[in-house]
């Protein structure tokens, strides 16, 4: 964040301070988490659904915060000074982000969609940052608190910012776009995610389409042209349209697609690209990155160089070797679309042992949740997966689908949660097995991967200890 005086910030957020000398100082960082507050930060006592930041003002100031923004009338007995008083801390936080964004002369790329937001954001940033200076949303900073924090990372001299915009209800993306002021909008696709909030896929498309509505006339709207709701999304904007995908009606089409030992190779306009990632569904994210790169004037050679340097992160179809097992860690989140794509990726991967799915519930699917889980079970059976381990409240629906698809009962294990499932998974793993681990965030499926690594360490210790005893005889 560029240096801003507290006096200026007080003007923007309509704040008051009982410490006049305080207003002469400047800040270069804002914080809403007292645990990560640093010396000189401006701490906002945000009021969230679970926690009230006013409880942590003392901690933030003790860690060296320059000041804390609190609500007028909030209990401040015993709090360290200095404090800045406002009518509504949450609104003041957004007001500052709104003002600060408009001081920056750069292009913001807003990314939303039902699936693949984070992967697409990462790929766009990876391609652009090889040649331009800019930032992306850290972690999953994609809500009413995360987007302002992301905006605050922008500094003078940055040429771009890739900001992820998430929503679980209509109107939320419209407000986030108002803050971010994107010049380029990317909608990755529409699928059954947060259905219990949106109600239907058409309403989901309307909500995601709020990003396109926010684009200026000279902006650029990029979308998945293969998506069923492409026409509905296109109707939301007066800006230029660019469709990407695998079919011929797209402006940017991937052809000659091959999964190789090194990743996925494909061609765009006669240029061959290599994406060093497992999973053909990631081609869409790569196409979005190529489309944005072209808008910034990057050559095909530059784009191929950037695509080749993309790496996955844990939890996002990340492949790692754990002892003699290959683990596909896709544990960060799950939806019917991403779950199906991950299962196809597992089925297409060469394997010396068994192909195994360890699956947790896909959350927030509303009244059709059982049907979506049952359909995934049917798909797993159709793909001839060797073993299925499933946990959660919808595990029975997955099992029902798998058995109806003629997956043998002795190849299916059901449990209430991942802790209960762990021993069964470990007991049936063999050398050369490939294990896909996936479920929604609240299922904590990553715990299994931690347990698998612990098991490998334990086996290594026992083997080393045994060898040591033998050598001493």
Image (cartoon, helix red, strand yellow):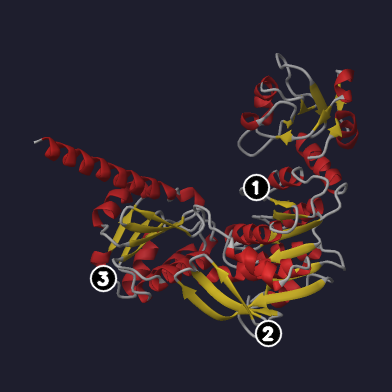
Q: Which of 225 and 348 is in front in this view?
A: 348
Q: Residues within 10 Å of mark 2 (few under 14, many from 20)?
A: few
* Mark 1 surroundings: few (<14), some (14-19) or many (≥20) residues within 10 A: some
**How many C-alpha atoms fall within 10 Å of the one at disc 3: few (<14), some, or many (≥20)?**
few
Which structural element holds mark 2? Answer: loop
Q: In this view, does 194 lie to the left or right of 394?
A: right
- Which of 80 and 436 lies nearest the eye of the viewer? 436
Front disc: 1 or 3: 1
Residue at (86% x, 52% y) in the render: 105
**Direction top: furthest residue:** 78
Whether residue 260 can be seen here = yes
In three-dimensional space, the C-alpha distance between marks 1 and 3, rounded to whole angstroms, equals 44 Å
Cα distance between the residues tagged 3 and 2 = 42 Å
Tell me the residue that label 2 is attached to.
249
Residue 205 tag number:
none
Query: Which of these two is toward me, 78 or 197?
Result: 78
Q: How many marks?
A: 3
Q: Is residue 200 visible?
A: no
The residue indicated by pointer 3 is 408
Sequence-first tag of 1 and 3: 1
Percent across and percent down for residue 386 are 30, 68
In the shown orientation, is residue 46 left or right of residue 254? right
Query: What SS does tag 3 mark?
Result: loop
Q: Which of marks 3 and 2 is nearer the N terminus?
A: 2
With 143 as the anchor, is 455 left or right in this view?
Answer: left
Percent across and percent down for residue 373 are 44, 65
Tag nearer the camera, 3 or 2: 2
Q: Quadrant of residue 381?
A: bottom left
* Residue beneath disc 1: 138
Q: Are marks 1 and 3 in contact (CB under 8 Å)?
A: no
Residue visible at 59% across and 61% down?
A: 309
Please tell me whether residue 172 is drawn above or below residue 369 in the rendered image: above
């Amino acid at each position: 964040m560029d240096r801003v005086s507290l006096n200026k910030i007080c003007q923007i957020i309509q704040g008051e301070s009982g410490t006049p000398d305080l207003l002469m100082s400047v800040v270069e960082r804002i914080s809403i988490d007292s645990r990560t507050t640093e010396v000189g930060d401006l701490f906002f006592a945000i009021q969230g659904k679970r926690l009230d930041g006013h409880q942590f003002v003392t901690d933030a100031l003790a860690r060296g915060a320059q000041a804390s923004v609190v609500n007028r009338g909030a209990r401040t007995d015993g709090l360290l000074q200095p404090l800045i008083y406002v009518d509504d801390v949450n609104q003041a936080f957004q007001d500052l982000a709104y003002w600060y964004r408009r001081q920056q002369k750069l292009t913001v790329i807003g990314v939303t969609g039902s699936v693949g937001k984070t992967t697409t954001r990462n790929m766009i940033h990876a391609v652009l940052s090889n040649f331009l200076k800019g930032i992306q949303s850290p972690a999953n900073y994609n809500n009413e608190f995360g987007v302002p924090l992301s905006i605050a990372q922008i500094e003078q001299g940055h040429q771009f910012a890739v900001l992820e915009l998430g929503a679980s209800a209509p109107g939320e993306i419209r407000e986030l776009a108002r803050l971010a002021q994107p010049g380029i909008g990317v909608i990755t696709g529409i699928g059954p995610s947060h259905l219990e909030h949106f109600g239907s896929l058409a309403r989901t498309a309307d909500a995601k389409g709020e990003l396109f509505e926010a684009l200026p006339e000279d902006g650029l709207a990029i979308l998945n042209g293969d998506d069923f709701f492409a026409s509905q999304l296109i109707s939301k904007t007066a800006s230029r349209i660019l469709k990407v995908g695998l079919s011929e009606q797209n402006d940017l089409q991937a052809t000659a697609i091959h999964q190789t030992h090194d990743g996925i190779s494909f061609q765009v306009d006669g240029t061959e690209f290599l994406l060093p990632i497992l999973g053909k569904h990631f081609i869409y994210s790569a196409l979005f990155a190529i489309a944005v790169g072209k808008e910034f004037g990057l050559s095909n050679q530059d784009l191929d160089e950037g695509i080749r340097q993309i790496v996955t992160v844990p939890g996002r179809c990340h492949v790692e070797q754990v002892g003699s097992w290959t683990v596909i860690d896709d544990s960060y989140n799950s939806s019917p679309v991403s779950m199906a794509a991950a299962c196809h990726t597992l089925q297409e991967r060469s394997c010396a042992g068994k192909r195994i799915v360890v699956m947790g519930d896909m959350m927030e699917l509303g009244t059709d949740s059982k049907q979506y889980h049952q359909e995934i079970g049917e798909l797993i059976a159709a793909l001839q997966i060797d073993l299925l381990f499933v946990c959660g409240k919808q595990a029975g629906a997955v099992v029902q689908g798998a058995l109806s698809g003629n997956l043998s009962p002795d190849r299916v294990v059901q449990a209430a949660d991942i802790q209960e499932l762990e021993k069964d998974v470990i007991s049936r793993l063999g050398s050369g097995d490939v294990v896909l681990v996936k479920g929604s965030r609240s299922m904590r499926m990553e715990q299994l991967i931690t347990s698998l690594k612990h098991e490998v360490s334990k086996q290594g210790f026992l083997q080393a200890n045994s060898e040591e005893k033998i050598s001493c005889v």
